[in-house]
Image: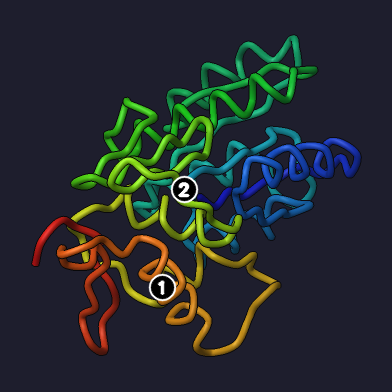
Amino acid sequence: MKALIVEDYAPLQKSVCKAIREIGWVVDAAHDGEEGQWLAENHAYDVIVLDIMLPKLSGLEVLRRLRSRGIPTPVIILTAKDGVDDRTRGLDMGADDYLVKPFFLNELISRLKALVRRAYRQQDPTLCVGDLIIDTSARVVRCEGREVTLTAREYSLLEYLARRTGQLVTRAEIWDHLYETYGGGTSNVVDVYVGYLRKKLRRADKADLIHTRRGQGYILKEGE
């Protein structure tokens, strides 16, 4: 999964980004409202953490603009303890959740996971595709009953495909979720990691779970 953090207080931004990366997600960060709006409009995110008090453009104005442009990405707003009006306005403007500062990082992580499950209409943290089972809470993968050892990048790719089971996922979408915006890799990185996954998920006498649509992308599903 990929998150955008829009927070101008550097120590808090650093702590939040670190906590999210520790659960295997990809994170982009912005220091002001204008940068946050630009990133949210030009890149695909699964969830946005948006502070209310931001330089250049307030969090509420960023939220208003995103929703007016039809961007449905789940947003959790961060507010001050006495910012009741900001909380209610944020929720009325399309925010999905809020947290009052100061907050515990583990609570933020739990809320982010819940928002992602809700966005993908998957309340159960365990994803199943045929005999492939992905426990997203423990980050454990089993195929035909055997545990499959994956790198952090392989797991992130598999979870993303599994959350969109049966749907065509383009290489561009995978790239955007696999890397942070200012990171990157070689041009064939998506194909390379899909190849790694195919080998590790190969089953005796059964078709591969990851199917290629030449020139388009990939689909994770049972059967073809």
User: What is the crowding at mark 1: few (fewer than 14 residues within 10 Å), some, or many (at least 20)?
Assistant: some
Q: Name which residue lies at 87% across and 40% down.
A: 9
Q: Name which residue lies at 46% across and 36% down.
A: 136
Q: Residue 27 at what x, y percent from top left?
A: 65, 53
Left or right, 25 with reference to 118: right
Q: Three-letter amino acid code at disc 1?
A: Val
| Number of numbered discs visible in the structure rendering | 2
| N-term-proximal mark, 1 vs 2 | 2
Question: Which residue is at the front of the view, 222 or 204?
Answer: 204
Q: Name which residue lies at 64% across and 25% down.
A: 108
Question: Which residue is at the front of the view, 17 or 51?
Answer: 17
Secondary structure of residue under mark 2:
loop
Give yes or no for contact between labels 1 and 2 (Cβ–Cβ under 8 Å): no
Vertical position of residue 214 compared to residue 65: above or below: below
Residue mark closest to the camera, 1 vs 2: 1
Residue bearing mark 2: 46
Q: Residue 68 at what x, y percent from top left?
A: 39, 49
Residue 208, by quadrant, is: bottom left
